[in-house]
Amino acid sequence: MRKKTSTNFVNEQQILETCSMALTISLLSGRWKPTILWHLQKDGLTYTDLKKKIIGATERMLVKQLQELEESKLIAKKPLADMPNRSVYVLTETGASIIPLLKQIEQWGDSYKAST
């Protein structure tokens, strides 16, 4: 974590406040964030279900990325009514609104792979 007084931190905050594209990329940055959002587009999933679907993600990284997505209000953690000690992760309205962008990114990636 950078010091809040560092030039690098101040510059990052300035670009995030003035450039919507940089903000969007920042919200999606992280190896597993787009994949987490993608898996949550249809149904809420427990941590265990997400762990099974996202092969290769360490527990530490998955927890960190889930926390960051929650802090960004792209996902929410909802307790399960029938099991009080368990919860599911779901997309928020804001999180759901980014799915069309992720679909376009996927299409662009497919096109790029085909052309290289």
Image (tube, helix red, strand yellow):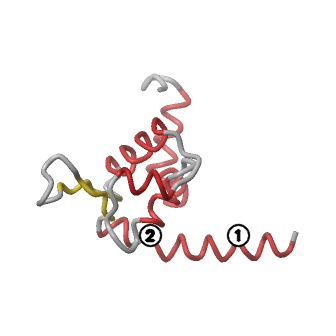
Question: Is 106 placed left or right of 64 in the picture?
Answer: right
Of circles 1 and 2, the one toward us is: 1
Label 2 SS = loop
Residue 5 locus on image (x, y percent) = 44, 23
**The one of 53 and 15 positioned closer to us in this rendering:** 53
Q: How many marks can you see?
A: 2
Question: Is 113 placed left or right of 58 in the picture?
Answer: right
Question: Is 97 placed left or right of 32 in the picture?
Answer: left
Give the residue drawn at x 49%, y 77%. 100
* Above or below: residue 87 compared with residue 39: above
**The one of 22 and 106 positioned closer to us in this rendering:** 106
Residue 98 falls in which quadrant of the image? Answer: bottom left
Q: In the image as oriented, which residue stretches furthest toward the right? A: 116
What is the CA distance from the residue labelled 1 to the residue labelled 2? 17 Å
Give the residue drawn at x 72%, y 74%. 110
Give the residue drawn at x 37%, y 65%. 95
Other residues around mark 1 within 10 Å, as few (<14) / some (14–19) / many (≥20): few
The quadrant of the picture occupied by the C terminus is: bottom right
Q: Amino acid at mark 1?
A: Gly
Q: Are marks 1 and 2 in contact (CB under 8 Å)?
A: no
Q: Which residue is mark 1?
A: 109
Residue 103 locus on image (x, y percent) = 55, 75
Residue 66 locus on image (x, y percent) = 39, 48
Query: Which numbered marker is on residue 67?
Result: none
Residue 84 locus on image (x, y percent) = 12, 50
Other residues around mark 2 within 10 Å, as few (<14) / some (14–19) / many (≥20): some
Q: Which residue is mark 2?
A: 98
**The one of 58 and 31 positioned closer to us in this rendering:** 58
Nearer-N-terminus badge (1/2): 2
**The one of 116 and 42 positioned closer to us in this rendering:** 42
Label 1 SS = helix
Q: Amino acid at mark 2?
A: Ile
